[in-house]
Image (cartoon, rainbow, N blue to C red):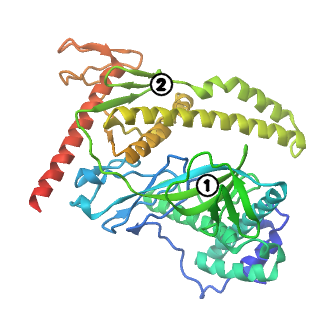
């Protein structure tokens, strides 16, 4: 057997495929094309994995907006959705990227689709769980073998192996290996699709001048999911999986929209069913521009609003730090490879998961409260990746500003409200009343303007400046839209 099949057969029982690579698996260099360096499409969204092998699914409120008209290009996104306020005119702010993007002059030429992922607890029997674990391991070995084939073939011949070539080899593998014939073809193809998306993300980052992050081999604790790619049937709180049959799941909330894809995922606290659905077009932006608010995110207080309200910082990570450190010390004393260390590792993972769930719950509830009260929400467009390189990195990560903004954008898109990101430079130093510059250090918590005599909390002053900048940007965008409507 040649190609990826030889690598798969040799890799069974091995953690690293490179240790067992034969010379005979390489393809004919003249029969394959170059690497597919795509990832950006016209009128479609290319799913690209994030570092760490994340899934193309978010939480319950993670929306991925797709532009369907083909009028312009979108940079591919994966798991972190990018919301585009298409109704604001020719120059719109993108809440998930740096700066602004140019859009078509007529907003009616394209629409925004809302894609949501529902996450339900899966309740497989012991026999079904054993099959799911086997399938995940088969997908992991296949993923590593396909990655090794791509790497070695490119080093030898300077040409890449495409996803379609590897899918052809998969047919041969399933015909000659009974263990892979037992796994549905759509499940195995999902592993190859995941690798292909990882390579597209790699080339996209290289092209953008970012840290490339070459795809890595997956260990047993780093590959925990597979996609059913439209083959699953959902009915009566059961998902019908090929070669397994109906598997129960806890449908704690009604499933809305048209199902697009289904994924099975294994986490620390059990199995989960991820159902990606299309909710249709987002509602139009019918907002009252006078009902706006500015948000200044911080560490002393999680957020201060322009109306003077303050949202306290819960500091979930700091509160659980003592218990987490205790569990980590217990795990460190256990022998590597032992069962006791595996049990201790699960306890550490559960502690991290609890903190993660607390943060997500807080961000969603806070974002929902703001969207219900205000029509236009303005926030600072912070470069969080650059901010976490200093001494306040742990506190900034614990505050989860980026997750909060993502939840805020998703809630606003669903409700037909606006979220505006503004330039954060000078919001603290500038006086919200007269516009004069008042320099102050980080330890100075009060804004005292010598020009107009305004005295108030520095975060409140910054929130007022953020609100004003958001109002100016929104007013300009709506005036441009009205002017364009008058010219047609």
The residue sitting at 27% across, 28% down in the picture is 465
The residue sitting at 85% across, 64% down in the picture is 13
Residue 215 shows up from this direction: no
- Dot 1: what SS? strand
Against 434, residue 221 (above or below) is: below
Mark 2 in CB contact with mark 1 (< 8 angstroms):
no
Which residue appears farthest toward the front when viewing the image?
Answer: 236
Marks 2 and 1 sit apart, C-alpha to C-alpha, by 33 Å
Residue hosting label 2: 299
The residue sitting at 27% across, 37% down in the picture is 470
Image coords of residue 192 (percent x, y) = 64, 69
Image coords of residue 182 (percent x, y) = 79, 73
Q: Is residue 484 left or right of residue 50?
A: left
Task: Choose between 369 and 186: the one closer to the eye.
Answer: 369
Residue 244 shows up from this direction: yes
Mark 2 and mark 1 lie on one chain; the one further toward the N terminus is: 1
Q: Which mark is residue 181?
A: none
Task: Choose between 283 and 143: the one closer to the eye.
Answer: 283
Which quarter of the rendering shows the N terminus? bottom right
Q: Is residue 243 left or right of residue 471?
A: right
Residue hosting label 1: 274
Which quarter of the rendering shows the C terminus? bottom left
Image coords of residue 14 (percent x, y) = 83, 63
Which of discs 2 and 1 lies nearer the camera? The answer is: 1
Against 202, residue 314 (above or below) is: above
Q: Is residue 391 left or right of residue 125?
A: left
Image coords of residue 334 (percent x, y) = 87, 36
- Dot 2: what SS? loop
């Amino acid at each position: 057997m040649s190609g990826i099949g030889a690598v798969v057969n040799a890799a069974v029982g091995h953690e690293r495929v490179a240790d067992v690579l034969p010379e005979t698996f390489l393809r004919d260099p003249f029969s394959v094309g170059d690497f597919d360096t795509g990832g950006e499409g016209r009128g479609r969204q290319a799913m690209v994995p994030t570092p760490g092998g994340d899934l193309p699914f978010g939480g319950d409120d993670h929306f991925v907006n797709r532009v369907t008209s083909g009028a312009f290009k979108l940079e591919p996104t994966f798991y972190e959705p990018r919301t585009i306020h298409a109704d604001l005119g020719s120059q719109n702010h993108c809440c998930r990227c740096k700066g602004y993007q140019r859009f078509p002059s007529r907003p009616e030429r394209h629409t925004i689709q809302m894609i949501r992922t529902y996450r339900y607890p899966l309740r497989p029997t012991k026999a079904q769980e054993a099959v799911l674990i086997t399938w995940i391991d088969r997908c992991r070995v296949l993923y590593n073998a396909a990655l090794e084939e791509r790497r070695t073939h490119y080093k030898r011949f300077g040409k890449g192996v495409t996803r379609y070539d590897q899918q052809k080899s998969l047919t041969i593998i399933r015909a000659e290996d009974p263990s892979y014939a037992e796994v549905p073809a759509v499940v195995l193809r999902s592993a190859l699709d995941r690798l292909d998306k990882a390579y597209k993300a790699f080339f996209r980052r290289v092209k953008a001048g970012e840290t490339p992050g070459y795809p890595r081999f997956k260990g047993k604790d780093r590959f925990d999911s597979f996609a059913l790619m439209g083959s699953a049937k959902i009915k009566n709180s059961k998902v019908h999986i090929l070669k397994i049959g109906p598997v129960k799941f806890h449908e704690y909330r009604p499933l809305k929209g048209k199902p697009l894809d289904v994924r099975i995922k294994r986490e620390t606290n059990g199995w989960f069913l991820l159902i990606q659905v299309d909710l249709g077009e987002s509602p139009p932006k019918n907002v009252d521009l006078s009902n706006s608010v500015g948000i200044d995110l911080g560490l002393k207080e999680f957020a201060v609003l322009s109306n003077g309200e303050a949202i306290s910082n819960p500091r979930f990570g700091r509160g659980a730090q003592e218990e987490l450190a205790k569990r980590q010390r217990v795990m460190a004393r256990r022998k590597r490879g032992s069962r006791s260390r595996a049990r201790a590792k699960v306890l550490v993972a559960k502690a991290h998961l609890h903190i993660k769930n607390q943060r997500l719950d807080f961000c969603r509830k806070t974002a929902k409260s703001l969207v219900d009260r205000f029509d236009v929400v303005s926030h600072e467009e912070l470069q969080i990746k650059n901010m976490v390189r200093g001494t306040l990195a742990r506190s900034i990560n614990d505050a989860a500003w980026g997750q909060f903004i993502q939840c805020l954008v998703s809630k606003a898109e669903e409700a037909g409200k606006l979220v505006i990101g503004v330039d954060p430079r000078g919001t603290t130093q500038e006086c919200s009343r007269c516009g004069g510059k008042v320099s102050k250090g980080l330890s100075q918590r009060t804004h005292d303007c010598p020009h107009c005599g305004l005295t108030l909390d520095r975060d409140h002053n910054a929130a007022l400046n953020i609100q004003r900048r958001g109002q100016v940007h929104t007013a300009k965008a709506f005036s441009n839209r009205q002017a364009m409507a008058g010219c047609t």
